[in-house]
Amino acid sequence: EVQLQAFGGGSVQPGGSLRLSCAASGFTLESYTITWFRQGPGKEREWISCIPTDDERPYYADSVKGRFTLSRDNAKNTVFLQMNSLKNEDTAVYLCASDRRCTGSPTLELYIQWGQGTLVTVSS
């Protein structure tokens, strides 16, 4: 079955780091752009980052630029989201989605496929 799931969430203190994984089964992630979204409690879904299928530099929302980094491990069929200098406002459910190219759209239904997401809680 074709699946796309985000893993690696947890509870961290402000200023800490966490690495999330977007793992695919049933298809090859290398063939798709991967976009990360998040939705905090009482907030709208937010587009935060996208990594293209080629070797171009990933794109980041202003809210995470300089703190989050996307990378691929094609051998593991996985895309990683390295999250540094975490803030309380980063608390959200994070999920990844596949697409043909980076569009920057926050509308999840426009993407090819997405997973259930993983919860990140930043608090002291």
Image: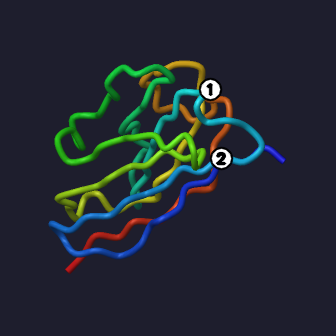
Residue of label 1: 31
Asked which quadrant contains residue 123, the reply is bottom left
Q: Residue at x 22, y 57 (%)?
A: 84
Q: Which mark is residue 24?
A: 2
Nearest to the observer: residue 73 or residue 96:
73
Question: Vertically, is 44 above or below 99?
Answer: below
Question: How far across and down, in percent of the image, does residue 17 sit?
Answer: 25, 64
> Image check: 63 left or right of 103?
left
- Neighbour tally class for label 2: few under 14, some 14-19, many 20 plus, Cα within 10 Å: many
Q: Residue at x 53, y 44 (%)?
A: 96
The amino acid at mark 2 is Ala
Quarter of the image containing the C terminus? bottom left
Question: Vertically, is 124 above or below 106?
Answer: below
Question: How far across and down, in percent of the image, does residue 72 sit?
Answer: 46, 40
- Neighbour tally class for label 1: few under 14, some 14-19, many 20 plus, Cα within 10 Å: some
| Residue found farthest to the bottom | 124
> Image check: 120 left or right of 65?
right
The amino acid at mark 1 is Ser
